Amino acid sequence: MVVVEVNGYTIEPGANLREADLEGANLSGANLSNANLEEAVIDLTDFTGANLSGANLHWAHITWWGSSANFLGANLTRANLTLAFVERSNFAYADLSGADLTEANLVRALLI
């Protein structure tokens, strides 16, 4: 099994990435199912095609005005995005089935 590390954080299913600084990380295709990304900083993070099913992204956020995150084609089934600040982010073709988006900031987000 290959261990992937980004900014000193181990990227794997169930990883504890609470308050992790993932700014600018390339996590395309990563398996972060059931991972805890609560309050993680995700400015310019690329989650293209990543598996975030069941992940906790409560209050995950973009810190810089004008930044965004890319969730193109990501699996976000049953993910918790309550209070997430993901304004201007790309969720095109992402699977948000059963995801909790309560009070998430999706202003100008791409949701097709």
Image (tube, rainbow, N blue to C red):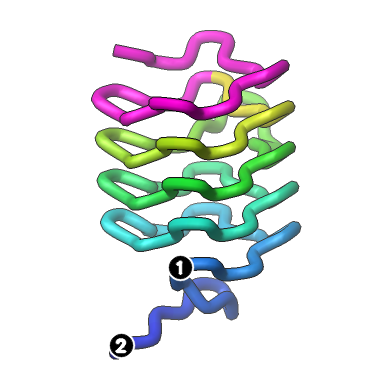
The residue indicated by pointer 1 is 13
| Disc nearer the start of the sequence (2/1) | 2
Residue type pointed to by label 1: Pro
Residue located 39% across and 26% down the image: 97
Q: Nearer the viewer, residue 37 or 21?
A: 37
How many residues crowd mark 2 within 10 Å: few (<14), some (14–19), many (20+)? few
Residue 51 drawn at (x, y percent): 35, 51
The residue indicated by pointer 2 is 2
- Quadrant containing the C terminus is top left
Magenta part of the chain? 88-112
Residue located 54% across and 49% down the image: 55
Q: Residue furthest bottom?
A: 1
Considering the whole magenta stretch, tell me its main secondary structure. loop
Residue 45 drawn at (x, y percent): 47, 48
Task: Kindly report which numbered mark, 2 or 1, lies closer to the viewer in this rendering.
Answer: 1
Q: Tell whether 70 sits left or right of 55.
A: left
Residue located 31% across and 30% down the image: 94
Is residue 101 found inside the magenta-colored segment of the image?
A: yes
Residue type pointed to by label 2: Val
